[in-house]
Amino acid sequence: MSESPAANPSTAVVIGAGVIGLSCALGLARAGWTVTIVAEQPATETVSGVAGGIWFPYKAEASPRAERLLKTSFDRFVELADDPASGVDLVEGLWVERLPGTDRSWTASARNVRRAPEGEVPRGARDGIVAELPIIDMPTFLPWLAAQAAAAGVTTLEASVDSVGQALDVVLSASGATPALAVVAAGEHSGAILGDDSTGYPIRGQVVKLEQAGITHWLVDDDHEDGMIYVIPRRNDVVVGGTADEGETDTTYSQETEDAILRRAIEAYPALAGLAVKERAVGLRPARPALRLEEAEGPPVRTLAAYGHGGAGVTLCWGTAEEIVELAGPPANEPCGP
Ligand SMILES: Cc1cc2nc3c(=O)[nH]c(=O)nc-3n(C[C@H](O)[C@H](O)[C@H](O)COP(=O)(O)OP(=O)(O)OC[C@H]3O[C@@H](n4cnc5c(N)ncnc54)[C@H](O)[C@@H]3O)c2cc1C
């Protein structure tokens, strides 16, 4: 980092403009911080843009803390469902259970939860849970979230940085002020930017997005013997998945995988047959043994880590933002002039 004037005590930089960076930036701005996002790519072009957008704690930490974050996010999404512009809808669907002792803790937050009647449980499955969950239409939600952040005063600078110090320099040269607080929310690159954590790992996911023609219910069959199945009906498409390959970094789209995904999804959900493919996508879920939401040592200013959300970054975004705002505390007043 170059020689810089004293840090401005009420300014913060957030590294990352995915769903986590945007929600943290919005939370901090609403708490009185002057926030600048530094990000290589806008949200729609990140892993967040690949997400199906169902509220569900998939491949995320299971802990009392995570449950609190889940509940906070769930409640916020339920509120947002009253605002059509946010892209959030409450949708009923079926969670298929095939293994004994499947974790049902998520049902504590969900709405209108009931056991699926026998006739609705697929052949070979043990049980099923019907529930109403938020489905977040990501092509609507991410621009909405970015607009909310901008309206709260957040500015965004496009840059790739290797460290917190570099992000401070980017903000300093654009605004003449050095932030007093940094939040690292750069998904799978966060550990490298902080330089103190190499425990993150990717979980590759491939999805195919079909035209939306009257698909009204979600379906998740995670432990299907031929591979996971999920069907997420959004406003203008239906996201069909999927795969979850731990440690796999290749983001090349596989036609063979798509064929297999569609074969098993159509068998489970026959109404999908014949729907045209609108889009294809691969993303790397930013996983970690545990979510990292804490103060990090080392960078030249106070720094908070906000990453490791695995397959549940959308699901946990509002709870994460709340936690970061709490960790940050209120901004100090700017120093008075002479
Ligand atoms: C196929 C698939 C389906 C999914 N479905 C769901 C779902 O239904 N529900 C759910 O809750 N979650 C889902 N997820 C998981 C979810 O997408 C992630 O948990 C979430 O997007 C992580 O958000 P993030 O903001 O941490 O990271 P990202 O979205 O990856 O954003 C990272 C940001 O940091 C920036 N950045 C990175 N490195 C640098 C750098 N060096 N310098 C500057 N900027 C940098 C990027 O440009 C970007 O702006 C899914 C993921 C996949 C792959």
Image (cartoon, rainbow, N blue to C red):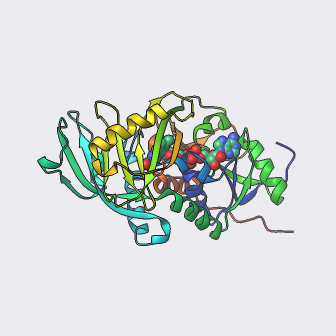
Q: Residue 176: name its quadrant.
A: bottom right
Image coordinates for residue 64, horizontal then vertical, percent? 36, 45
Image coordinates for residue 30, horizontal then vertical, percent? 58, 67
Task: Kindly identify the residue that appears in the image at 73 percent across and 44 percent down.
Answer: 160
- Which quadrant is the N terminus positioned in? top right
**Which of these two is toward me, 46 or 75?**
46
Q: Answer above or below: position of 30 versus 15.
A: below
Q: Quadrant of ligand 1?
A: top right
- Which quadrant is the C terminus positioned in? bottom right
Task: Kindly identify the residue that appears in the image at 45 percent across and 72 percent down.
Answer: 83
Task: Give the total of numbered labels.
Answer: 0
Image coordinates for residue 91, horizontal then vertical, percent? 33, 60
**Which of these two is toward me, 181 or 161?**
161
Residue 100 is at least partly visible in this image = yes
Q: Residue 243: name its quadrant.
A: top left
Residue 6 is at least partly visible in this image = no
Q: Answer above or below: position of 33 versus 251.
A: below
Task: Using residue 124 as the reference point, say whether residue 39 is left or right of it.
Answer: right
User: Extreme left residue here?
Assistant: 118
User: Extreme front residue here?
Assistant: 274
Image coordinates for residue 79, horizontal then vertical, percent? 40, 68
Task: Kindly identify the residue that appears in the image at 29 percent across and 34 percent down.
Answer: 224
Task: Using residue 25 as the reference point, say whether residue 217 is left or right of it.
Answer: left
Q: Residue 8: name its quadrant.
A: bottom right
Q: Answer above or below: position of 221 versus 145.
A: above
**Which of these two is toward me, 16 or 319?**
16
Task: Using residue 37 as the reference point, say whether residue 306 is left or right of it.
Answer: left
User: Extreme bottom residue here?
Assistant: 83
